[in-house]
Amino acid sequence: MKKLFAMIALVGAFALAAPAALAQDKAPADAAPPAATAPADAAASAPTATPAAAPAATAAPAPTPNKGDVAWLLVCTLLVIMMSVPALALFYGGMVRSKNILSVLMQVFVVFSLITVLWCVYGYSLAFTEGSAYIGGFDRLFLSGTFDSATGTFANGATFSKNTPIPELAFVAFQATFAAITVCLIVGALAERIKFSAILLFSVLWFTFAYTPIAHMVWFWMGPDAYTDPKLVDELTARAGLIWQWGALDFAGGTVVHINAGVAGLVGAFLLGKRLGYGKEAMPPNNLPLTMIGASLLWVGWFGFNAGSALEAGNSAVLAFINTFLATACAVLAWCVGEWLMKGKPSMLGAASGAVAGLVAITPAAGNVGIPGAFVIGTAAGFVCLWGVNGLKHMLGADDTLDVFGVHAVGGILGALLTGVFNDPSLGGPGYVSDWVTGAVIAAKDYSIAGQLWIQAKGVLVTIVWSAVVAFAAFKIVDMAVGLRVSEEDEREGLDIASHGESAYRL
């Protein structure tokens, strides 16, 4: 009991102290709100004109959120919640042994809840307010400023189109699901041997020092409405996250979510060591129907993940939707073909894994490539991730229980790099906005595949190094504080009974 209270106190201390350790100088009072939460337009953020300056009747009204966009984003948020609870939990739970299924379900369920709370306390502020190129500040601590109860008004944020706001709280909720599922993904690499207290404390540390900085570096910018004059472009871009400044393309989280989590999972697998009996005794999945159901729900929920990242119910969401649909189907077929050739039989576990591989790889590319890119990325993901969970896994020698690195990190790297290729308008891609003042998109003749590929590679490398260093430090701190691994006796008995005092199946 003393250890439990000590752990709770330590978690609380980190939750409260982490923002102070990470934050840079507070953004100036006139700084723009967060990326994708920048002022809806210049009029909305400018001082109110006095009657002497201009008649009130001539002032242009501030734009209001479109109900369709708001409804779309809320639905997408619900879909991403479903991706974790229950989809990821079932996908993971079906693949472990029967004595550990409840422990995995519990870890996903509770970690998702923990990160949601931390996101609303300080995570959102660190990720999506202005601070430095690496981390945000305190402007939205405890979500302050998003709702004024005295007047009943809600703060608006921007999308990727000028004068097209959404309620900032809708964006907060949507991004909370991204943060939560990212940390939950790491659970799969550590399953069947990590202490419940250890995974909770690690989640606090890694979320604070790895997820929020990477999210800030990749996704924070000043919003399209801030770009009103060509003279402001350099200044505004310099206030964005580091990887955004470089021009890296990550539509829905190839770097922020999948590479980030996959690398942390691999580090944890090395530090925890292999499961008892690993490589010597059979460790078959306990319930593949649950895994198939989980994978299917992941596929459905991923439309919210990818298409929702457009932040509007428009053409960009449609492109992300069809690319997510197509690439996943291509990856399922590719994985099955590869497994058929390698092992003589395609498996249900392989088909489910292929679906997740396709979903992962298309995530950074979803709204950034055209239909040809979806075909290639999905097909490549099926074959490459199949190698990732077989050949690469044996080369690395780590017991990554549910192949988080082989699917999420490998698939995320593949998708991030191929985004730089197939974003090219000459290859059917939509290109990228080259001038946020006018909204002009780069022409095919001006697009450099080699240049964009190098930018994508830099973003991937920063994510790998950052996540690995933070994960290593966090696991070491957790090991010293509460210990990482359960006892040999508990591991043999199973974590369902040993850690939670219950069993999934009555024998």
Image: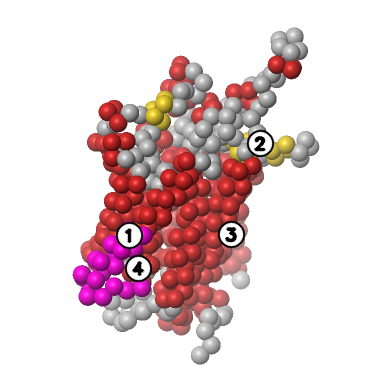
Instruction: From the image, tell me which residue sits under label 1.
Output: 331
Characterize the local packing of mark 1: few (<14), some (14-19) or many (20 or more) Cα atoms within 10 angstroms.
many
Q: Main secondary structure of the magenta part?
A: helix
Do the residues under discs 1 and 2 have CB atoms within 8 angstroms?
Answer: no
Do the residues under discs 1 and 4 have CB atoms within 8 angstroms?
Answer: no
- Separation (CA) of disc 1 from disc 3: 31 Å
Q: Is residue 404 visible?
A: no
Q: Give the magenta-colored segment's residue range.
A: 329-348
Q: Depth-wise, is mark 4 or mark 2 nearer the camera?
A: 4
- Separation (CA) of disc 4 from disc 2: 44 Å
Instruction: From the image, tell me which residue sits under label 3.
Output: 113
Image point (71%, 10%), residue name: 53
Q: Position of residue 195 (x, y in %)?
A: 48, 69
Residue 351 circle label: 4
N-terminal-most mark, 1 or 4: 1
- SS type, badge 4: helix
The kind of residue tagged 4 is: Ala
Verify whether residue 70 appears in magenta.
no
| Near-viewer residue (126 or 441) | 441
Q: Position of residue 364 (x, y in %)?
A: 39, 46
Instruction: From the image, tell me which residue sits under label 2.
Output: 155
